Image (spheres, helix red, strand yellow):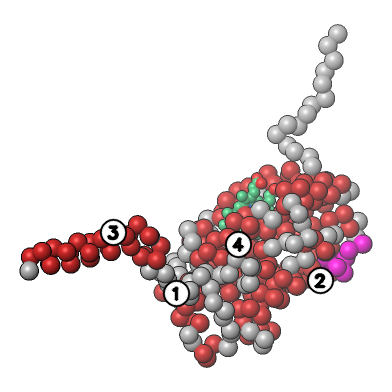
Amino acid sequence: METVKAEQPDSMPQDLSEVLKEATKEVHTQAENVEFLKNFQKGQVPLEGFKMVMSSLYHIYLALEDELEQNKTHPALAPVYFPEELNRTPALEQDMEFWYGRQWRKEIPYTAATEKYVNRLRDLGRTEPELLVAHAYTRYLGDLSGGQILKKIAQKSLGLPSTGEGVAFFSFPAIASATKFKQLYRSRMNAIEMSPATKKKVVEEAQTSFLLNIQMFEELQELLPKNQENGNVSGKQELRKRAGDKGQGWTFTETPAQKPQQSLLSHSPLLRWILTLSIVATVAVGFYAM
Ligand code: HEM
């Protein structure tokens, strides 16, 4: 007699990591297509916009990491508590100083959408800390994935030094392999004991988290001066302009954008030879004609 296999809900993954990935696919595409990020991917990075994103991320990570710290022994959070490897606040503090100078705490913006995001994190920390796993997933796994592409684009578009100044946020020095770390993180998420009802709430919270990020980018796009909205004034141009502007209160070391351009001749010995030969030939013809 044939045994009847237990119904395997193939189309419905059970591991939290898989459920999260599946449930946020659509909203991830939505996030990638937000105007600011679409332009960003094309290398159009307005400096003011970049600074604003970094400031918002500073506020967001400060709240997220503070709440994770406060709730680190919670059974839903302890398995994914990786402060050494993941915490972004110290790197963002460095970036803030780079972009806004020593007085950055007084200078950086705190926009309405950022405040809404921060309030959500603070509320969860107080009332439903188990849902913070959704926010940690959305941010950290995102930073370890697309974030790495964005770092290279920012460095190139803004003419930043390859040594990482201004983009410390995107580097995870305590993580040797992002791929392996993401696997570990997923397995830890899957090990969290969770009722189906809580799992459902976590998944919904991850979608909320994506939406909060989208709103942050949309608001930022609105706040950009109109001439920078679609990268008409690129970050690099803007950096050059600001580097010469003494009143802005931030220092700027020489970047590839500011290095004097070498002439074409210094790059091409062949061109130099051709030029020399033509001069000699012209002089010779001149002598002959005399
Ligand atoms: C320009 C924008 C973006 C690009 C190019 C991008 C790109 C990527 C890529 C290539 C992956 C890896 C996919 C895979 O391993 O299958 C990824 C994963 C991810 N991204 Fe993004 N992303 C962007 C924006 C965002 C934003 C705004 C968020 C949320 C704040 C986000 C959150 C995530 C998360 C959570 C994952 C991990 C998915 C998983 O493995 O479960 N991404 N992204």
Mark 3: few, some, or many residues within 10 Å (few <14, many ≥20)?
Answer: few
Residue at the spot of label 2: 66
Q: Give the range drawn in magenta.
A: 66-73
When asked about the image quadrant of residue 15, the answer is: top right
Nearest to the eye among marks 3 and 1: give it: 3
> Does the image show residue 142?
yes
Nearest to the eye among marks 2 and 3: give it: 3
Who is closer to the viewer here, 66 or 14?
Answer: 66
Residue at the spot of label 1: 260
The amino acid marked with disc number 3 is Ile
How far, Cα to Cα, is label 2 from label 1?
A: 45 Å
How far, Cα to Cα, is label 2 from label 3?
A: 66 Å
The picture places residue 192, in percent across and down from the top left corner, at: 87, 49
The amino acid marked with disc number 1 is Pro
Q: Are marks 2 and 3 in contact (CB under 8 Å)?
A: no
Nearest to the eye among marks 2 and 1: give it: 1
Who is closer to the viewer here, 4 or 249?
Answer: 249
Q: Which residue is drawn at 47% across and 64% down?
A: 44
Q: Residue at x 28, y 64 (%)?
A: 276
The picture places residue 127, in percent across and down from the top left corner, at: 84, 66
Magenta-drawn stretch, dominant element (helix, strand or loop) = helix
Residue at the spot of label 4: 151
The amino acid marked with disc number 2 is Asp
Residue at the spot of label 3: 274
The picture places residue 223, in percent across and down from the top left corner, at: 51, 75
Q: Which residue is drawn at 52% across and 58% down?
A: 41
> Does the image show residue 210?
no
The picture places residue 178, in percent across and down from the top left corner, at: 72, 52
Q: Do the residues labelled 3 and 1 touch (CB within 8 Å)?
A: no
Task: Say if 229 sits above or below 8 in the image.
Answer: below
The amino acid marked with disc number 4 is Lys
Whichever of callouts 2 and 3 sits on the residue coming sooner in the sequence is: 2
